[in-house]
Image: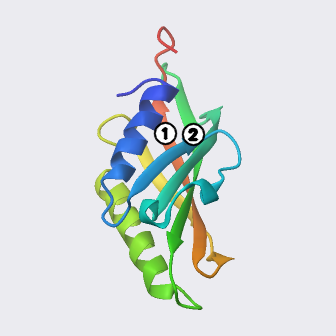
Amino acid sequence: MAENRRAILSALKTLLESVTGVTTVVRSYGELDVAQYQASDLPLIEIEEPSESTDEDSTGRRAIMLLEAKLKVWFVDWNDIPQSTYETLMKNIRDDVGSGFTVSGSAVACWITVVSPIKGELPVFNFEMSLRLKYYLNQLNT
């Protein structure tokens, strides 16, 4: 188990880097300027700095934390409606998160809770995926 925020976010970044079709994964603490990346850097997954809260349903003695992470997936598509690229990326991310449900053993669980519609304009589009990660907190090592 990761037991701290930095380790769980690092493991999530590593998991997302292995998604088929994804070229770049970055963590952001503010608005990402996607224009600084070249078309060859896309598809790009942006992990926005997540909010964190305590799991109030926890009945054990160990503190369980929840991270509410949002991924913004940027991609290039020259079609007016980039449906196939969107569906392929969404499926690949969903499959890799599902097969790595514990984020390489660092979390209790990771769920995709929301997937947004496609936004953007030709040729750069994006969509968002919300994740909920649950992990044990090591209160001596936070």
Is there a contact, CB below 8 Å, between mark 1 and mark 2? Answer: yes
Check residue 67 in the rendering and tell me which mark sits there, or answer none: 2
- Alpha carbon distance from label 1 to label 2: 7 Å
Describe the element under mark 2 as helix, strand or loop. strand
Q: Residue furthest bottom?
A: 80
The residue at 65%/33% (across/down) is 53
Describe the element under mark 1 as helix, strand or loop. strand
Does 138 sit above or below residue 126? above
Q: Relative to the observer, which residue lies in front, 40 or 100?
A: 40
Query: Mark 1 packing: few (<14 Cα in 10 Å), some, or many (20+)?
Result: many
Q: Residue furthest right?
A: 31
Q: Position of residue 97 (x, y in %)?
A: 37, 56
Q: Quadrant of residue 43?
A: bottom left
Amino acid type, mark 1:
Lys
- Whether residue 114 is visible here, answered yes or no, is yes
Does 129 sit above or below residue 52? below
Q: Position of residue 7 (x, y in %)?
A: 42, 28
Q: Quadrant of residue 11?
A: top left
Mark 1 and mark 2 lie on one chain; the one further toward the N terminus is 2
Query: Which quadrant is the N terminus positioned in?
Result: top left
Q: Position of residue 8 (x, y in %)?
A: 44, 34
Check residue 134 in the rendering and tell me which mark sits there, or answer none: 1
The residue at 47%/36% (across/down) is 9
Check residue 117 in the rendering and tell me which mark sits there, or answer none: none
